Amino acid sequence: MNASAQYRYDKRRWPRRLSCLLPLLCYQADSSLAAVNNLQIHGFLSQTLLYTDRNHFFGADGNLSADYTELGLNASLRPSSRVLVAAQVMARRVGDSASDGSPQLDYGVVDYQPYTSASANAGFQIGRGKLPLGIYNQTRDVAFTRPGILLPQSIYFDRTRNLGLAADGVMTYVERRLSNGTLRFNFGVGVPLKDDDVERALGFQGHPTRIDPKASMISQLQYEHDGGRVVAAISTARVKADIEEIGGRRLDGEFYFQPIIFSAQYNAEHWNLTMEYALRKREFSGLSNPALNSQVTGESAYLQYTRLLSEDWRWLLRYDLAISDRDDRWGYRQSEVSGSPAYSAYARDWTTGLQWSVTPRLLLAAEYHYVTGTFWLTDRDDASKRWNLLLMQMTLRF
Amino acid sequence: MLFCIHAYAENSTSPHDLVLIANPDSRTPMSISRETARAIFAMRQRSLDDSGAAIEVFVLPDASPVHSRFAKQVLGIYPSQLRLAWDRGVYSGTGQAPNQVTNQAQMLDRIANTTNGVGYVEREWVDERVRAIPLR
């Protein structure tokens, strides 16, 4: 039911669309945790300014852009102890992408927990659920759950974000408490979302392509030790989609995306260290033009350090590496075959940033990226190899 | 600050020790493990036994020193981690946030008047309206 957004967005129309939601952002409860018969309503608004010195990213193109806004509103209710009903509507506007600010159902689930005890619980969610991939995916659009403004693009890439964001289906979960830790397992089957960005990214050299996501699966095993001091997880997914070329020669192929993500995090009182490593297998098969059938495994890794400088200030330092093809790490072969620059096959990103929690409801952040390579850009081929990206963000929440 | 976990023990006598409390009518067991207490206050535990009776969790504000001491000394978790756990639940559709009270007097009132209420206060605040739950 993901209404494919019109690619062209109208700057004048978007504020009006959201204006109906804005009064809710001014809603003030006695405390930030409004609970009326356990009905809870929460929301957030993030506005970001971006500056790139060269390449095109999120609407910035060698200039300053304000084309990056995230707005979310959710409600949850426990009608009985075993049931949780929760839904969130999200409006996201990002320059030069399918996110045009129109409200979308971000998630909408009925969560039933038939088994519960002091040491374990198990249940399932039916509906549109967020996918537990890596450490940050489930709340990737919520600024105050992120270590910085942009998540590491090697793993949480925004170019084809919708395929890994949420799915319509069933997610089962089991949680078991150990003597000093908790083991958590999620397994889900569902149909992922898609949007024009996915079709653009997976399309063939300008041919309009239709991507039809099919039943896919996801699983995550996570262990939290000593109250979350150490977190380790393995996430896997097998996403399947049909491909059809519109107009011209018909293509009736299949696309498989199979990421496996290893995550590790150490949380001390004033700092934390996070590492994630992913192998991303992508496979095109059954296409009428055999030359287009391919199987490529990409690689992603980042190392991230955050430190509390004071009660309200947090500093971030990160190195992030994305590689399109493990067998052609620096893109030389791809460059020979397709003529595109070798540096479009990878991206190395040094990031540093600051987050300032001005009040519990207001978060300000600034972030600088020095990037070599253009792998995670939409227009990779005519982009410069080395570029700088500066972001500033204000987030309000209730 | 040197951080060490100080689990609440039976023979502890300081009036400022933090005590996990529940409504006397609640089905909360006579004692619970620290891992279960962590799950309750991280809002990952909706019920305490297989009866499925819901629990209502109450906390003091993030900035409250009592909240911070409870998180660190009793649960062995930093307050920022608790906040992140709540946010991740609330914004992913997998959980809710706890009920926030402004001070310990209000905490007692709310626990006393909420059948399945669970919270915490300093030992000197405990009165007959609530039941202290030792951690094992």
Image (cartoon, rainbow, N blue to C red):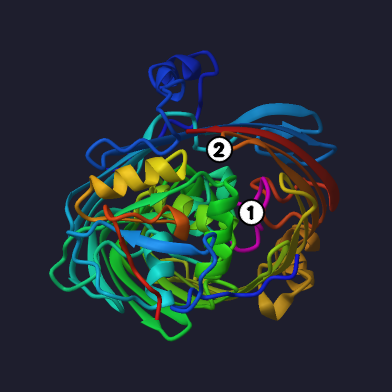
Query: Residue at horizontal 44%, vertical 14%?
Result: A16
Residue A182: % across, % down: 43, 78
> How many labels, in total?
2
Q: Position of residue A318 (x, y in %)?
A: 77, 61
The residue at the point 73 percent across, 63 percent down is A271
* Residue A205 visible in the shown view: no
Secondary structure state at the residue bearing disc 2? loop
Residue A370 left/right relative to B92: right
Can you tell which mark lies on residue A343? none
User: In this view of the protein, which residue sits in the foreground, A368 or A396?
Assistant: A396
Find numbered disc 1 in the image and state the secondary structure of the residue it sits on. loop
Q: CA distance from mark 2 to mark 1?
A: 17 Å
Task: Tell me the chief SS of the magenta region.
Answer: loop
Give the residues drawn in magenta, as a range.
A146-155
Question: Disc 2: which chain?
Answer: A
User: Relative to residue A271, is residue A137 drawn left or right?
Assistant: left
